Image (spheres, helix red, strand yellow):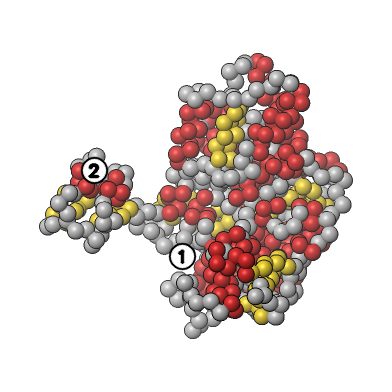
């Protein structure tokens, strides 16, 4: 099965507004998910703009699907959905 | 750590810089609160109106004002902005004029929840059990059983918490006032209106309350606006970046230096270069003291909250503090020698540095959060920046100053290079709190022997400072 690719925006705005916590997610991932996800810290993904500043931090799943206001919990939940896994 | 308060602080700083750069700050500053908390949308406090009021005070603090000094509630932020612009134009220091107390911290009354006094109380979970461990474990006989339930006599209770741990039903709770609990020196207390107030004669500016308050009511008075205005005026500013930056920003410190340059600083340097000088001088000072008296005790001088603690609360021991200037002070000297017209900006994770900077003629202090806001607003991405071509990178031991034990290691290494059989009986205080202050007193009074005491106000060192990112 192909791994879920999670790109974390580390542009300064996202970094400042919470991407730091997301970057630590890799180590804290539930055991079941560990070998099913691939994290990558990216430079600014260009997803934020003036009006949606509140949307930072952003992540992107599998290269196409952006998520605004990403938190570790939300990211894990989405990974489970993509993998078709039940909630614990 | 209050992440919600952190988020809003950073978001506001980014918005402020963006509006400033777009030349629209004056027209927009009074609208920011409404834009961030529009009606019919969720609020963080009781209602959006309360949120907006607190945002106004946050912006005041970002402009450099102390919220306690507000004398005219109707005064608009645009008007405060005009004042600051006028002062900077005339070369006046708005910070000094506005506040006789020169405190970098300010408590925002409308944000403070006025938490009820700390006490130990029995909740409904009490089963009025036969064993009554609450009663038997109380050293003050403050617990009695009334009507089949445990009742605590508040006039006798010393809040030791023994009953809290003894109760098998978790029926007894200890309520707390987070800012008072966090303050190591008892400097923050509620005033006659039930609002927290900092006693600036006691405050050591460690910033513990700043992060402890769940309502984000303690605010830092920023110099961001003065820096933005100075840059716009074309003044040459030098970014002196503290070694703790590597934990707060992505990429290497050299990349961050490039980012600072792009953001408009005329010169950049890592403060670790100043730390190298601190190591040399501090080691020499220690060896000299040691030769004079082998029982000597010297303590470090680079943590400003620690120096404030000794000066304000342990004045009898002030001569134990090393006279060696801090890395920031040496960095300032180095830049001023290079070009005396440069204005120096220390960039770090520390609240107390703001008080040290004032004493030591460092022009401005910018927190990592505020630097991050400038970079974010100007779309400067640290990760994609090239490494800055520094003359030479600072020594590894100097870059380690931001970690607990870093100073001690640097001094030992330096001393060993001069005296081969050098031995140090060093002790470290890794984070100042009420209990650690008791330990500090044991060391300083000689009850626990040591000859080199390193004290860092923040657990883990500067890299976990109150304004660090992470």
The answer to which of marks 1 and 2 sits earlier in the sequence is 1
Q: Is residue B366 left or right of residue B66?
A: right
Mark 2, residue position: B138
Compare residues B228 and A20 and report the one nearer the observer.
A20
The image quadrant of residue B304 is top right
Residue B114 lies in what quarter of the image? bottom left
- In this picture, residue B32 sits left or right of residue B438: right
B65 vs B55, nearest the viewer: B55
Determine the residue located farthest toward the front in the rendered image. A1
Determine whether A69 is above or below B358 in the image. below
Gap in Å between the C-alphas at discs 1 and 2? 38 Å
Please tell me whether mark 2 sits on a helix, a strand or a loop: loop
User: Where B393 falls versus B236 (above or below)?
Assistant: above
Whether labels 1 and 2 share one chain = yes
Q: Is residue B68 visible?
A: no
User: Residue B333, how many percent across, how many down?
Assistant: 78, 40
Q: Chain of mark 2?
A: B
Q: Position of residue B384 (x, y in %)?
A: 79, 64
Instruction: Identify the residue under disc 1.
Output: B110
Question: Which quarter of the picture shows residue B407?
Answer: top right
| Residue at horizontal 58 percent and vertical 18 percent from the top | B295
Which-is-in-front pick, marks 1 and 2? 2
Q: Nearer the viewer, residue B156 or B401?
A: B401
> How many labels sit on residues?
2
Residue B339: x and y in percent read 86, 45
Chain bearing mark 1: B
Query: Where the N terminus of chain A falls, by quadrant?
Result: bottom right
Q: Is residue B356 visible from the viewing direction of this image?
A: yes
B369, B56: nearer the viewer: B369
């Amino acid at each position: 099965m192909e791994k879920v690719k999670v790109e974390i925006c580390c542009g300064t705005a996202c970094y400042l507004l919470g991407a730091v916590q997301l970057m630590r997610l890799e180590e804290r991932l539930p055991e079941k998910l560990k070998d099913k996800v691939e994290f990558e810290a990216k430079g600014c993904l260009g997803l934020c703009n003036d009006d949606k500043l509140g949307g930072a931090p952003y992540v992107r799943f599998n290269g196409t699907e952006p998520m605004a206001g990403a938190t570790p919990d939300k990211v894990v939940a989405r990974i489970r959905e993509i993998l078709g896994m039940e909630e614990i | 750590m209050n992440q919600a308060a952190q988020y809003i602080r950073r978001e506001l700083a980014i918005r402020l810089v963006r509006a400033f750069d777009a030349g629209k700050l004056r027209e927009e500053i009074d609208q920011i609160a409404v834009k961030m908390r529009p009606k019919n949308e969720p609020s963080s406090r009781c209602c959006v109106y309360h949120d907006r009021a607190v945002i106004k005070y946050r912006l005041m603090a970002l402009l450099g004002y102390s919220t306690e000094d507000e004398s005219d509630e109707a005064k608009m932020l645009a008007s405060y902005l005009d004042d600051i612009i006028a002062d900077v134009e005339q070369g006046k220091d708005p910070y000094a004029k506005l506040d006789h107390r020169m405190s970098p911290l300010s408590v925002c009354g409308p944000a403070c929840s006025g938490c009820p006094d700390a006490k130990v109380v029995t909740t409904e979970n009490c089963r009025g059990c036969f064993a009554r461990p609450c009663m038997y474990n109380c050293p003050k006989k403050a617990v009695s059983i009334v009507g089949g339930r445990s009742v605590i006599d508040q006039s006798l209770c010393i809040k030791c918490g023994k009953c809290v741990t003894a109760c098998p039903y978790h029926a007894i709770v200890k309520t707390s006032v987070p800012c008072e609990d966090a303050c190591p020196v008892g400097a923050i207390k509620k005033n006659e209106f039930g609002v927290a107030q900092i006693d600036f004669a006691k405050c050591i500016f460690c910033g513990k309350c700043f992060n402890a308050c769940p309502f984000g009511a303690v605010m830092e008075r920023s110099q961001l606006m003065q820096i933005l205005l100075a840059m716009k005026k074309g003044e040459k500013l030098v970014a002196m970046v503290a070694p703790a930056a590597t934990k707060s920003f992505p990429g290497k410190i050299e990349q961050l230096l490039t980012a600072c340059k792009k953001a408009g600083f005329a010169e950049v340097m890592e403060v670790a270069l100043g730390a190298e000088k601190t190591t040399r001088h501090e080691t020499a000072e220690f060896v000299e003291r040691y030769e004079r008296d082998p029982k000597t005790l010297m303590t470090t001088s680079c943590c400003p909250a620690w120096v404030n603690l000794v000066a304000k609360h342990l004045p009898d021991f002030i001569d134990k503090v090393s006279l060696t200037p801090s890395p920031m002070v040496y960095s300032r000297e180095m830049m001023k020698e290079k070009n005396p017209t440069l204005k120096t900006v220390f960039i770090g994770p520390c609240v107390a540095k703001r008080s040290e900077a004032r004493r030591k003629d460092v022009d401005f202090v910018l927190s990592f959060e505020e630097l991050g806001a400038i970079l974010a607003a100007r779309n400067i991405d640290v990760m994609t920046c090239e490494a800055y071509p520094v003359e030479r990178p600072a020594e590894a031991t100097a870059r380690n100053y931001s970690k607990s034990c870093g100073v001690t290691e640097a001094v030992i290494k330096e001393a060993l290079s001069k005296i081969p059989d050098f031995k140090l009986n060093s002790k470290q205080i890794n984070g100042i709190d009420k209990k650690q202050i008791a330990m500090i007193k044991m060391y300083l009074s000689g009850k626990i022997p040591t000859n080199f005491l390193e004290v860092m106000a923040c657990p883990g060192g500067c890299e976990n400072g109150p304004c660090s990112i992470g």
